[in-house]
Amino acid sequence: MSSHLLAGLLDARTDRLVTVAGTTLSHADLLGAAGAVAESLVGRQRVAVSATPTMTTVVGVTGALLAGVEVVPVPPDSGSAELRHMLTDAAPDAWLGGAPDETTLPTIDVDEAARASYEPGVVDSERIAFVLYTSGTTGLPKGVLLSRRALTAGLDGLIDAWGWTGDDTVVHGLPLFHVHGLVLGALGPLRVGGSLVHVGKGTPEAYAGVAGTMYFAVPTIWSRIAEAPEHAAALRDARLLVSGSAALPVPVFERVRELTGHEVAERYGMSETLITVATRADGVRRAGWVGVPVDGVETRVVGDDGAAVAHDGESVGRLEVRGPTLFSGYLNRPEATAESFTDDRWFRTGDVAVIDAAGNHRIVGRESVDLIKSAGYRIGAGEIESTLLGHPAVAECAVIGVPDPDLGQRIVAFVVAHSPVSAAELTSHVGEELSAHKRPREVVFVDALPRNEMGKVQKKRLAQ
Ligand code: MLC
Ligand code: AMP
């Protein structure tokens, strides 16, 4: 395959189709519309895109990638504080496509009907393609800088692992502002030259309504499919069902197998590393295991002392990775970037894992209780706590993720209030400042938070 990130799209085929929220363009037409966007981006360095699940987003992002302009995919439901942070930190030149009402930046139109014959120039592979915002345990979300080299290597690893070709049609309903939906789910088909159907919202009914060869979903969607036999049956003719972004529960793997005849292929990754470990289409599928390193990636597990842990399928350690799929650092955060690597340049994932002698990986959990995964979204407890503390009625608070059969973890906030306030008011305060999926599902009012002698909140006791 050509080295261009969008190699498959550049073939401009008329029989490969991209459908997003009911609008369909052939690769030839998408290339024409994106070429017009690329022409309008001359002189721009970095643009923000309100990443709604629409064709406008796909055309806008594709145009920026053709032009070699950096994209900041902004979650469309971002609250005011989150939006302000991203715009200040990333300082984009303009909005591409629709912009939030309160913007003061110039906007550049995206016209899905435009057709330009744009000749993409050569773009340095280390040039940044995306600034993807992702939560840490504390503080505001960090901008993960993803180069074209990382995206190309990450997609090629999966193309190899899954025998993914231009004959495949990918079906999914994932958000277009994170790695899963944006990189795998949108750029993947454009790199390989295949078709895509984005169903809008990831419901079992929507997945069942489209005939595809590969279905991508987070465990929450698989678990809902496992509870909808009439829709699950529609996936029997697929080639590959893929799960990622959080752990797929073993009973869900088993139920999906009963209903569809397929063993879901799990893969593991992060915003900072892209997908580093994947179950191969022609490899072993084991419930609870996420596969082997993709081409070019190396992994290791280390103990508390930093020494390597045996790859014996049982010994647990901190997972570290290295390879060409890794990010280029956090935007404006050199210390955070440096801390995320070991002295010998392995990236510390923060996940705890087991590796067996054949190189298969099982993700056991996360090191920090302050990084929550809910419905596949990565959410920092610290960010929600700071936001709650910004409400005048809140004196103290602690946020945890508690196990949830549908969401993996659900966000629960423990609050000490010094004046009367309802749970609903606090929940909507978080939604207005941050975004919808960061809202606590439950608010528990307490007289005091459990603390140790050092004054630190004992989150494990709260979870009990
Ligand atoms: C949610 N709701 C609430 C609420 N939270 N209402 C009140 N209080 C709260 N705290 C509302 C929602 O707005 C919604 O309303 C309804 O409850 C159901 O919400 P939900 O349970 O969250 O479900 P849903 O909206 O159906 O979405 C589920 C989902 C979605 C799985 C489709 O969460 C999703 O797309 N997740 C994917 C995240 C993802 O892509 N992660 C990848 C990160 S990249 P209403 O009115 O709207 O119905 C990565 C790398 C890798 O991790 O390895 O892939
Ligand atoms: P994000 O940065 O949103 O991409 O989230 C990355 C995190 O998601 C990882 O550090 C893991 O904790 C989690 N994750 C991704 N894929 C899997 C998987 N297959 N199994 C378990 N956890 C996963």
Image (cartoon, rainbow, N blue to C red):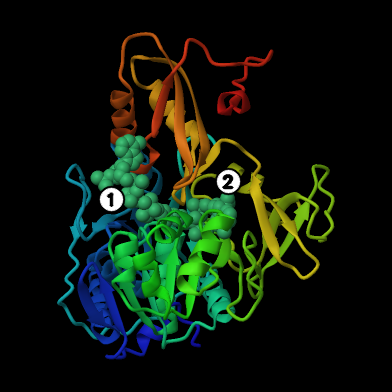
Question: Could you say which quadrant of the image residue 191 lies in?
Answer: bottom left
Q: What's the residue at 61%, 81% (across, down)? A: 282
211 is higher (above) or lower (below) than 225: below
Quadrant (top left, top right, bottom left, bottom right) of the C terminus = top right
Question: Could you say which quadrant of the image residue 281 lies in?
Answer: bottom right
Can you tell which of label 2 and label 1 is closer to the viewer?
A: 1
Instruction: Residue 78: tell me if it is visible.
Output: no
Q: What's the residue at 59%, 43% (across, down)? A: 336
Residue 168: percent from the left, percent from the top? 42, 83
Question: Would you name the residue on which mark 2 appears?
Answer: 334
**Which is more toward the observer, 326 or 264?**
264
433 is higher (above) or lower (below) than 420: below
Q: Residues within 10 Å of mark 2 (few under 14, many from 20)?
A: few
Residue 50 — which label?
none
Name the kind of residue labelled 1 in the image: Pro
**Which is more toward the observer, 444 or 39?**
444
- Alpha-carbon distance for marks 2 and 1? 28 Å
**Residue 376 placement, left or right of 281:** left
**Residue 159 placement, left or right of 311:** left
Q: What's the residue at 45%, 46% (across, down)? A: 407
Question: Would you name the residue on which mark 1 appears?
Answer: 76
Badge 2 marks a residue whose secondary structure is helix
Q: Residues within 10 Å of mark 1 (few under 14, many from 20)?
A: some
Name the kind of residue labelled 2 in the image: Pro
Q: What's the residue at 41%, 21% (across, down)? A: 389
**Ligand 2 picture quarter:** bottom right
426 is higher (above) or lower (below) than 337: above
